[in-house]
Amino acid sequence: MLTAVFLAFVTWGIASGRGWVVWLMGIFYVLGSLLGALFFLQKPEILGLMTAGLIAAALTQLTLQTTALALLCPRASRAWFRRRDQYR
């Protein structure tokens, strides 16, 4: 539930043209990825207890967030945020 609220906030922020939301998403993405990787490195047996559906959902979420960040970082995306700031 908390993840859904955070992602809704990030979506609203990006749609509103707030560039700092991209940084916030990037920070949470890096922290979450590092903590997730450390968790599975410390307790690899947990991966064996997860169902295929749960693993697929986690990988899908990781892929979607990676794609979103990759699409928000190119020069064209930064230019879009700059143009949005001019109209405020």
Image (cartoon, helix red, strand yellow):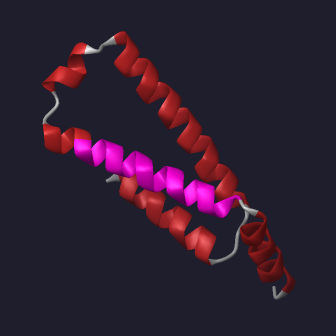
| Drawn side of residue 34 relative to residue 27, left or right | left
Q: Quadrant of the N terminus?
A: bottom left
Q: State the residue lying farthest toward the top.
A: 42
Left or right, 70 with respect to 74, comes to left
Q: Residue furthest bottom?
A: 87
* Residue 36: percent from left, percent from top: 42, 28
Q: Which residues are magenta?
A: 56-73
Of 18 and 30, which appears nearest the observer? 30
Q: Is residue 32 magenta?
A: no
Quadrant occupied by the C terminus: bottom right
Whole-percent x, y for residue 83 in the image:
82, 81
- Look at 49% across and 36% down and name the residue there: 32
Q: Is residue 57 above or below residue 42?
A: below
Q: Residue at x 58, y 37 (%)?
A: 30
Residue 44, given in percent of the width and then of the height, sits at 29, 15
Work out whether 87 lies above or below 29: below
Q: Does residue 57 belong to the magenta stretch?
A: yes
Which residue lies at the image location 46% right of the left edge and 59% below the top edge?
7
Q: Is residue 79 or residue 88 the one in the foreground?
A: 79
Judge left or right: residue 28 versus residue 56.
Answer: right
Report the residue that reaches farthest toward the right. Answer: 86
- Nearest the eye: 65 or 74: 74
Q: Main secondary structure of the magenta part?
A: helix
The total of numbered circles placed on residues is 0
Query: Residue 59 lies in what quarter of the image?
Result: top left
Would you place residue 2 above or below residue 50 in this image?
below
- Image-quadrant location for residue 40: top left
